[in-house]
Amino acid sequence: MRVSTGTVRHRRHKKIRALTKGYRGMRSNTFKKANEAMMKAGQHAYKDRRRKKRDFRALWIVRLSAASRAQNVPYSRLIKGLKDQKIELNRKVLSELAIHEPKVFEAVLKEAKVA
């Protein structure tokens, strides 16, 4: 007697189609295209989780550069001054200070200028 794969296959396909809900055209309702779309989306997600770290670092550097140049200190001199003074604040924290606590950032900038 032949074993029907109807229910098992239907469940598996339904799961994939649920993951691709909202995709355009056949990518959301045809199993074969949905499966391809889902695998490609997974590849992009994997790649972009790593890329996110680069993107945020670049954003923090741009923010710091703008904030330090407003005080007539280029970004490179700011970072060199912090290293010389052994101030171990990372770019994320410095960026947050520049946005939310400008007075504190100015104090840090003065310390970096001394070096």
Image (spheres, grey):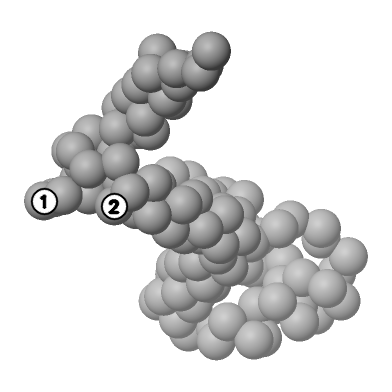
Query: Image quadrant of residue 18?
Result: top left
Whether residue 8 is situated above or below residue 49 in the rendered picture: above
Secondary structure state at the residue bearing disc 2: helix
Q: Say few, some or many: other residues with alpha carbon within 10 Å of mark 2 (under 14 / 14 to 19 / 20 or more).
A: some
Mark pair 2, 1: CA separation: 9 Å
* Residue found 51% across the figure and 18% down from its top: 2
Residue at the front extreme of this rendering = 1
Q: Quadrant of residue 87?
A: bottom right
Amino acid marked by disc 1: Gly
Residue in front for this viewpoint, 90 or 27: 27
Q: Are marks 2 and 1 in contact (CB under 8 Å)?
A: yes
Of marks 2 and 1, the one in the foreground: 2
Residue displayed at 83% across by 73% down = 83
Residue for badge 1:
25
**Which disc is residue 33 wearing?**
2
Q: Residues within 10 Å of mark 1 (few under 14, many from 20)?
A: few
Circle number at residue 81: none
The image shows residue 28 at horizontal and vertical percentages of 21, 41
Three-letter amino acid code at the position of disc 2: Lys
Res 31 visible: yes
What x and y, as percent, mark residue 31? 30, 41
